[in-house]
Amino acid sequence: MYKIIFKISFFICVAITLNAQDKSPMIDSSANSKVNQVFKDRKVINSQSTEMLNAGRLDFRVSHRFGDIAGEGGGWSSFYGLESARDIAIGFDYGISDNILIGINRAKGAGPLKQNLNSHLKIRFLSQRENGSPLSVVAFLNGSYTTMEKGGFAGSVTYFEKLLHRFSYHSDLILSSKIGKSFSIQALGGYTYRNLVEGDDTNGLISAGLATRIQLTKALGLIMDSRVIISDIRQDLKYFPVGAGLEWETGGGHVFQLNVTNARGIVETDYIPYTNDDWSSGEFRIGFTISRQFSL
């Protein structure tokens, strides 16, 4: 039943976006120009956004996820998770052109696969325009390779009988729209593939997500996102990745994001297949991202 409900919600959001009548988003001064900053950053919380880097811009990014705020692993004994690190990612993004972006990062890993090298490609096919397209459309492709030592037992995801077992992949098609000056909405569909899984799990996972941003002040925005994984062994909605947070654009190329989410991992190949934390049990955590851009 949840699959049907989510699919209906997904298409309703897309229909609202396509038929939005408010033509007042912040735009460039030229006629039919691109709508600026549908989202402030290229990632909402867990989900990618349709934002890109300008050609020749390099972005250094550091993302961090702490331990559980409450529940068995949280509370005062771990200073509400701040003394633990579930995942850390450090890397770079580079704008090859205004519509093509590449990136690489190293992530600690929060699921069974640790010490991950991740690379990604982002391509924008369509930009939202004042008197043109009401949508921005972007494709995102990610590949992950674990460098951890072989371990476990034959059949486990860390046994690595073949080199290919160390690889996993993810792709997203992302649609977004800025409605008015202060509200942005985004819908996406994704496919994650792991070369090795355990038990009755499936190699390929289909997922769908929603994200939104509400501009509170000139520099401050409220962001939220969620993703549903469509899988026969993932039926409980309380375990699906959900996040909420605040982001600041501090000027000079700096963006700071503070969020709370039940997802432990940062990269799609990690948090999508392996999130099993329950908000109602206190299994959520503080995270942040710092971004600094440079011109090359």
Image (cartoon, rainbow, N blue to C red):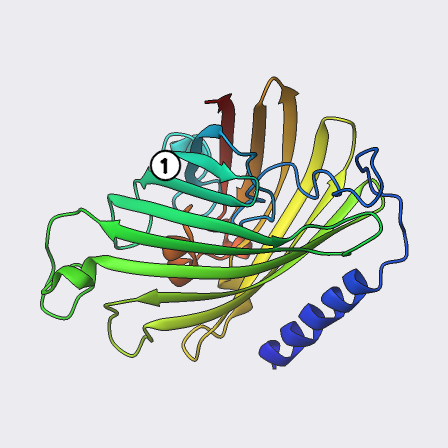
The quadrant in which residue 170 appears is bottom left
Residue at x 42%, y 58% (from the top left corner) = 275
* Residue 108 % position (x, y): 30, 40
Above or below, 92 against 253 in this view is: below
> In the rendered view, does 118 fall on the left or right side of 181?
left
On the rendered image, what quadrant is the C terminus found in? top left
Image quadrant where one finds the N terminus: bottom right
**Residue located beneath label 1 in the image:** 88
Kindly state the secondary structure of the residue where label 1 is placed. strand
Residue 254 image position (x, y, % from top left): 57, 23
**Quadrant of the rendered image containing residue 219:** top right
**Name of the residue lying farthest toward the top:** 252
Asked if residue 34 lies left or right of residue 163, the reply is: right
The residue located at (82%, 47%) in the rendering is: 130
Three-letter amino acid code of the residue under disc 1: Ile
**34 up-or-down from 205: above or below:** above
User: Do we see residue 132 in this rendering?
Assistant: yes
Residue nearer the viewer, 105 or 9 = 105
What residue is drawn where x is 65% and y is 27%? 248
**Is 239 placed left or right of 28 in the picture?**
left
Q: Residue at x 50, y 24 (%)?
A: 292
Is residue 86 in sight in this rendering?
no
Q: Residue 161 location, x and y as percent? A: 9, 65
In the displayed structure, 188 sits above or below 146; it is: below
Return the x and y of residue 233 as percentages of the image width and height.
Answer: 40, 76
Local packing at callout 1 (Cα closer than 10 Å; few below 14, some 14-19, many 20+) is many
